[in-house]
Image (cartoon, helix red, strand yellow):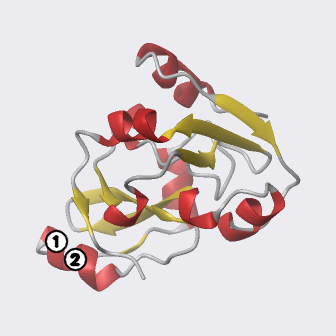
């Protein structure tokens, strides 16, 4: 499948240069980072959470887990993980579980974990389980400049 068309069009519209790296199919972001020889703290993964008013994409490193209670505190309302079916409906041109962390491409609200700041390179799923997108740290920061930052992973 490769990079999802929605993501590709968004990155091109934003004039964000990127590379696509192929990797063997894996079951989770941490394994993808390992298989691609990418530091997991530089691998941004998207985790969809739901709340009473809708959905929010939380963006954290592959090496960390979303702390739902911290996200809920930040939102001032309880949150829970979205089901795989709910997440798939929000990312219709992506394979199940291969959520790109670029919420704006899909019209979603997001928060990005502060631990992703300051990296020279950032990598993320391109919409399937075999294509990894690489952008420079400054380009990732530009993509995330309108996204609220916080500390909600461990």
* Residue most extreme to the left: 76
Task: Please give the label number shown on residue 74.
Answer: 1
Residue 131 horizontal/vertical position (percent): 75, 41
Give the total number of marks visible in the rendering: 2
Query: Which residue lies at the image location 26% right of the left edge and 46% below the top edge?
Result: 147
Instruction: Work out how far the residue at label 2 is from the one at label 1, CA to CA, in angstroms.
Output: 5 Å
Looking at the image, which residue is at 22% across and 77% down? 72
Seen from the viewer's position, the closer of residues 69 and 121 is 121
Q: Who is closer to the viewer here, 145 or 81?
A: 145
On the image, the x and y values in percent for residue 87 come to 51, 56
Element class at badge 2 = helix
**At 33% from the left edge and 42% from the top edge, which residue is drawn?**
144
Q: Which mark is residue 72?
A: 2
The relative height of residue 58 versus residue 136 in the rendered view (above or below) is: below
Q: Quadrant of the C terminus?
A: bottom left
Q: Residue furthest right?
A: 24
Where residue 55 appears, as percent x and y from the top left, is: 32, 58
Classify residue 25 as left or right of residue 76: right
Q: Quadrant of residue 37?
A: bottom right
- Residue name at image x 72 percent, y 33 percent: 20
The image shows residue 110 at horizontal and vertical percentages of 31, 52
> In the rendered view of the protein, which quadrant contains the N terminus?
top right
Figure check: 138 above or below 35: above
Q: Is label 1 in a helix, a strand or a loop?
A: helix
**Looking at the image, do the residues carrying marks 2 and 1 touch, with CB atoms under 8 Å apart?**
yes
Q: Few, some or many C-alpha atoms within 10 Å of disc 2 (few <14, some 14-19, many ≥20)? A: some
């Amino acid at each position: 499948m490769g990079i999802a068309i929605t993501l590709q069009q968004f990155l091109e519209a934003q004039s964000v240069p990127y590379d696509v790296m192929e990797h063997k199919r894996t079951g989770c972001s941490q394994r993808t980072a390992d298989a691609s020889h990418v530091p997991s703290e530089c691998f941004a993964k998207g985790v969809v959470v739901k709340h009473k008013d809708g959905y929010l994409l939380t963006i954290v490193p592959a090496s960390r887990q979303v702390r739902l209670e911290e996200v809920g505190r930040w939102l001032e309302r309880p949150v829970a993980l979205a089901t795989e079916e709910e997440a798939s409906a929000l990312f219709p041109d992506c394979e199940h579980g291969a959520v790109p962390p670029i919420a704006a491409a899909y019209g979603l609200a997001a928060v990005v974990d502060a631990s992703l700041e300051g990296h020279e390179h950032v990598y993320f799923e391109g919409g399937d389980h075999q294509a990894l997108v690489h952008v420079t740290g400054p380009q990732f920061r530009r993509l995330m400049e309108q996204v609220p930052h916080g500390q909600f992973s461990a």
